Image (cartoon, rainbow, N blue to C red):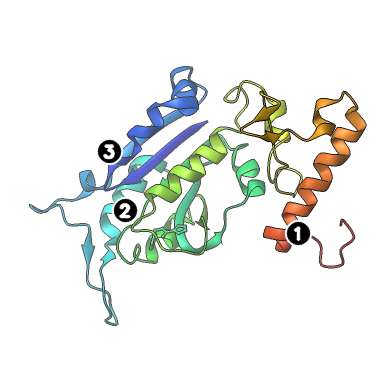
Amino acid sequence: MRVDIVTIFPEFFGVLDVSLLGRARREQLLELHVHDLREHTHDRHRTVDDTPYGGGAGMVMRPEPWGEAFDALLGEGESDAVVVFPTPAGVPFTQSLARELAEESRLIFACGRYEGIDARVAEHVATRARVIEVSLGDYVLNGGEVAAMAMIEAIGRLVPGVVGNPASLVEESHEDGLLEHPSYTKPAVWRGLEVPEVLRGGNHGAIAAWRREQALERTRRVRPDLLPADGADA
Ligand code: JF5
């Protein structure tokens, strides 16, 4: 998978050199390219923003540098890339969207700052590629960079070969629609706290049932919105 990121803070993305994604990059499972939006400005101050039409506080990102950046990335004609605009006004980012995007051959993340990017940019890019505006959650960040990074990590680890043990991908939170059951390792007693007895026996049926009950209880308690309203799964 190839991932391009357009940002005014390319140095933010240095963290993608470390850990699992860093190794995936070195092994060429992920090809990551970070681009400085200011390379597509032509004035002395490399201006990327201006005041909003209609008034209001804050600044809006000007369309011209974005237009040039996308011309350079998309080339002529229609592109097979999916262009992601991280924004609190987007569709929610979920494990299911991560799974879908992990199948793509090329993703482009457009990281906005200030009050966002002139709306014509997404409209124009949508004539040349699939565009999605995606929200990491219902809170406001200073820019799309941290949201893009979270999405790239969630998507990147689903690309075959990036995570060493693929079974660990299906056993975790959200893959079955429930939160994760608690996990324990040795020692069996630590500071007076015991690992639940059932996990120390070899009854795999009992262990699976206990884990499912724990996952259900936790989901009911902290994320009831994830369960069907009729309680059919509870
Ligand atoms: C941003 C306009 C981008 O705040 C966010 C965000 C929150 N969830 N997902 C993304 O991105 C920064 C702010 C305003 C565009």
Visible residue check, residue 78: no
Residues packed near mark 3 inside 10 Å, few (<14), some (14 to 19) or many (20 plus): few
Q: Identify the residue under disc 2.
A: 66
Kindly give the residue lying farthest to the top in the view shown. 27
Kindly identify the amino acid type of the residue bearing the numbered disc 2.
Trp
Visible residue check, residue 37: yes
Q: Identify the residue under disc 3.
A: 11
Q: Residue at x 71, y 26 (%)?
A: 188
Please state, as top left, top right, bottom left or bottom right, where the C terminus lies in the image.
bottom right
Q: Identify the residue under disc 1.
A: 220
The residues bearing labels 1 and 2 have C-alpha atoms spaced at a distance of: 44 Å
Examine the image and state in which quarter residue 211 appears: top right
Q: Ligand 1 sits in which quadrant?
A: bottom left
Task: Please determine whether, in this image, residue 139 is positioned above or below residue 168.
Answer: below
The residues bearing labels 1 and 3 have C-alpha atoms spaced at a distance of: 41 Å
- 96 or 129: nearer the viewer: 96
Expressed as whole percent of the image width and height from the top left, the position of residue 101 reads: 59, 42
Expressed as whole percent of the image width and height from the top left, the position of residue 85 reads: 45, 54
Sequence-wise, the earlier of marks 1 and 2 is: 2
Kindly identify the amino acid type of the residue bearing the numbered disc 1.
Arg
Task: Please determine whether, in this image, residue 35 is positioned above or below residue 127.
Answer: above
Kindly identify the amino acid type of the residue bearing the numbered disc 3.
Glu
Examine the image and state in which quarter residue 56 appears: bottom left
The residues bearing labels 3 and 2 have C-alpha atoms spaced at a distance of: 19 Å
Q: Residue at x 68, y 31 (%)?
A: 184
Residues packed near mark 2 inside 10 Å, few (<14), some (14 to 19) or many (20 plus): many
The secondary element bearing badge 2 is classed as helix
Examine the image and state in which quarter residue 86 appears: bottom left
- 107 or 176: nearer the viewer: 176
The reply to whether callout 1 and callout 2 are in contact (CB within 8 Å) is no
